[in-house]
Image: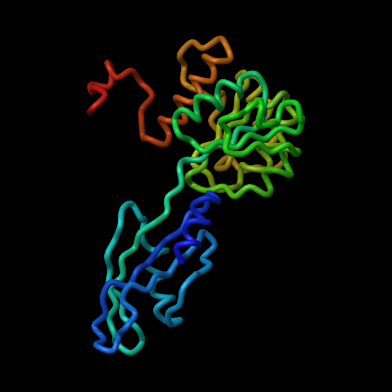
Amino acid sequence: MFKKLLLMQNSGASADIFTLLDSKSKKEKSVGTMLIMDDFGLVEGECSEFVLQQISEKRCQTTWEKPIIFWIEDEGGKQYRFFWDKIVQPFRVVVMGGGHISQPLVQILGMLNFAVTVIDDRPQFANATRFPTAQRVICQTFTNALEKLKLDSNTALIIVTRGHRYDVDCLRATINKKFRYLGMIGSKRRVKEIIKLLQDEGVSAECLNRLNAPIGLDIGAETPAEIAVSIAAEVVAVFRGGSGIPLSKAGRGLNG
């Protein structure tokens, strides 16, 4: 069981861990038994189907923020107390495009402990030498790579490709998926053109409203490194619940 958890941790997967702490049944000999559920609901461990269903319902109905202890009852009226913990992976960022802004951006995100994946279809721009701090570098078309990636509410998507058509490919592949944040670089004119194109293709206003473009906070950035700081700052603000305004104007210091 612990080998399974280690494999999941190393592979970047998240998992819910349920450990039996107590049972009202005097015959119960399985205190300490563990159940593991992955993001797809697959289970490692053994329990009755009814108990598994109860645990699954608890998992679906509860937003996990910290370890939880709870009781459930099986079909025979026996009560079980479980400890619910979780393997929580670091925030993930997918950077689409391996150009001059992506290099400092990926470096900064790595310093901030984000798990970064870089995608580009050009071998000279998608390699570990160019992005040594990236967790993963994928050299495929944007469409193919994004179809295979698992995105979730811990994922930020950053579109910084080399051209209009590739931006559109990335948006088509992601706009309807689950994510925490989606941002795209570009001038206001370019952004309007892309949004109009997607509207004409039938993409809903609700989906398009999820797009943050032009990407980044307004810090007067001009150089690639400055633009990277602007983008990284917005991503941090999204994950940490920041406002993006100066602390001197927000009425609080660094420690609240």
Q: Position of residue 215 (x, y in %)?
A: 54, 25
Q: Position of residue 136 (x, y in %)?
A: 61, 39
The one nearer the camera, 180 or 139, is: 139
Q: Position of residue 163 (x, y in %)?
A: 73, 24
The mark total stands at 0
Q: Position of residue 194 (x, y in %)?
A: 68, 29
Q: Quadrant of the C terminus?
A: top left
**Residue ID at (56%, 23%):** 214
**Residue ID at (38%, 63%):** 61
Q: Which image quarter: residue 113?
A: top left
The one nearer the camera, 199 or 221, is: 221
Q: Is residue 180 left or right of residue 85?
A: right
Q: Which image quarter: residue 166?
A: top right
Q: Is residue 81 left or right of residue 135?
A: left
Res 165 seen here: yes
**Residue ID at (56%, 20%):** 104
**Residue ID at (54%, 15%):** 225
The one nearer the camera, 179 or 87, is: 87
Figure check: 175 above or below 98:
below
Q: What's the coloring here?
A: rainbow
Res 209 seen here: no
Figure check: 25 above or below 237:
below
Q: Is residue 135 left or right of residue 86?
A: right
